[in-house]
Amino acid sequence: MSKTAAIVGAGIAGIAAAIRLAVKGYRVDAFEANAYPGGKLSGFSLDGFRFDAGPSLFTMPQLVEDLFRLADRNPNDYFEYRRLNETCRYFWDDHTYLTAWADRDAFAREVESQLGEPADHLLAHLADSAAKYHITEKLFLHRSLHKLATWFNRDALYGYLNLPKLEVFKTMNRANEQRFQNPKLVQLFNRYATYNGSDPYQTPATMNIIPHLEYNIGAFFPKEGMIGITNNLVRLAEELGVRFHFNTRVTELVTEGERIVGVRTENESKPKPYDVVISNMDVVNTFRRLLPNARQPERILRQPKSSSGLIFYWGIRREFPELGLHNIFFSSDYRAEFDHIFNRKTLSDDPTVYLNITSKHKPDDAPPGCENWFILINAPNNTGQDWDALIAKTRQNVIQKLSQNLGVDIAPLIACEAILDPIQIENRTSSSQGALYGNSSNNRFAAFLRHANFSHQFRNLYFVGGSVHPGGGIPLCLLSAKIATDLL
C-alpha cells in the first residue's frame, strides 16, 4: 500500500512538495484554506483588468521545469516563458532615467552613459555577485543547514576556503558604496535587499548574491503571467494524483509521542492519519495554531520578521510607452525610507514605488488603450499600526510621485482599484505579521535563524515555504520543497 502524505497549505512550495511526493509514490492530499491555490502567487480580475496578486519577477525558471522533468513530462507541453530584454526601468525625481538591459555589456554602457559610472565597475559587481552565488549555492541553497553531512563535503570545503568573499561582516550598503561612485547606482543595487524583505543598511553584503539571478541568469516572463506558474504546477500535481482540498483549513496536527498521527480540518471533527505531514504554513503559525501544546522553538519563532508590502492594483485608462514591465521610482532618501520601515514601523512620505505592468507583454490583461498597474510599496510588518490612515496617506504620496515623474495627473486615470495591506496578507496567507519573507535577514547569522525543513520533535513532520530554510521568493520556496522531500 502506498504511503500517504498531507500538505498543509497549497502555496508554491506546498504544490512543489506535493509533486515531489507524488513522484515518490505517495498518495497526497493538499489542504488549502483559500478557494484557490498559490498563496501569494495567485491572481484575480477586476472590471476587465487581470492582475497577478503577488510575486511579479520570475527568475530561475529551471526550478519550475525540474518539476515537470521529475515527473517525466516535457515542460514545453505545459509552461511557456521568454527571457526579457530588459530587467527594469529606473526613475529618479531629478528626471534621471536608466534602463537595466538584460545584456550585461549594454547595461554597463547605459550606466556609464546615464550615470557617469565606469562600465567596468558594474561588470565587476556582477562578477562578484556570481562568485558569491557559486560559493553558497550547493552549500546553502540545495541542502539542509541542520544536517551534519552538509558541513563535511567538498562543497562545504569550497565555501570555507572562500568565506571572506561573502563579506558577511560588511553591510550591503557599505559594499556597494565601496564599489560604485554614483550614489544612484548604490541605491539601485541596495534595492536588492528588498527581495528578501531586508534593510540594505543592516543586511550583510552576502545578499549581493541576489542580482546574479537577474543579470547573470536572467529575468523571464511567463506567457500566461505569473499565475501560469501556479496553474500549470497544479495541473501537473493533479495528473500525478494529488488531491487538492480548497476552502479546507487545517486546525490541528494531532500528535502522539514523536509523531504526527492525524490532521484535523475545520470541515471534519475526526482527524485523518497520514504517514508524512509537510507544512507550507508559516512556521510561526504552524506551531502557535496547529501545535500549541508542542514544545515551541521560541528562539526562532521570536526572531524579527521581514518587511511586508502595501499593494495598489489599478486599472489605468491610458497607455504609457515610457514604462516597461518592471519600473522603479526611487525615494530621494533611501536610508530614511528604510529607517521608517524597520525602526519606526511606518511608511515614509516619499516611498520607493515599484510598478509592474504585465499588459506590456500580455495585452489581454487590460482593455485596449489601458494598462494594469501593480504598485508595491515596501512596508513594515503588522504590529498594530493604523493601516487605514497609512494607506490613505501613502496612496496620495504614490499618486503625487508618479504624476510628477510621468508629467500627467494619475488620479483621474484610475478606472478601478483593489488594495492589499499587511493585515490582509497575514489573513490570506497565514504569514506571521504579514511578513512577506518570514524572518528578517538583517543579521549576518540570519540563514541559521530560520527553522529547519524538518522537525526536531516529530519524525514525520517537515516544513517548506518562505518562512523556513532557505528563505522567501519563488526560487527559494521551490528549493525548500526539494530539500524537505529529499530528507524523506
Image (spheres, rainbow, N blue to C red):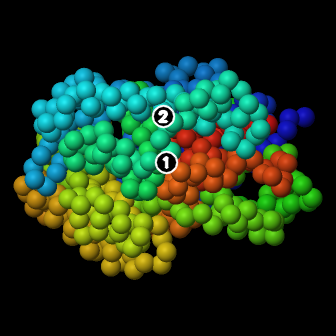
Q: Position of residue 114 (x, y in %)?
A: 13, 37
Q: Position of residue 166 (x, y in %)?
A: 49, 38
Does residue 127 sit above or below 55 in this rendering? above
Q: Is residue 361 visible?
A: no
Q: Is residue 144 visible?
A: yes
Residue shown at 61%/32% (left/top)? Answer: 160
The answer to whether 174 appears left or right of 110 in the picture is right
What label sits on residue 169 in the rendered view? 1
Amino acid found under the numbered disc labelled 1: Phe
Q: Quadrant of the N terminus?
A: top right
Real-space Cα separation, disc 2 to disc 1, in angstroms? 11 Å
Q: Position of residue 238 (x, y in %)?
A: 65, 37
Towards the viewer: 180 or 221: 180
Q: Which residue is mark 2?
A: 165
Residue density around tag 2, few if under 14, some if 14–19, many if 20 or more, within 10 Å: some
Occupied quadrant, residue 143: top right
- The residue at the far right in this view is 257
**SS type, badge 2:** helix
Residue density around tag 1, few if under 14, some if 14–19, many if 20 or more, within 10 Å: few
**SS type, badge 1:** loop
Residue shown at 66%/30% (left/top)? Answer: 156
Amino acid found under the numbered disc labelled 2: Lys
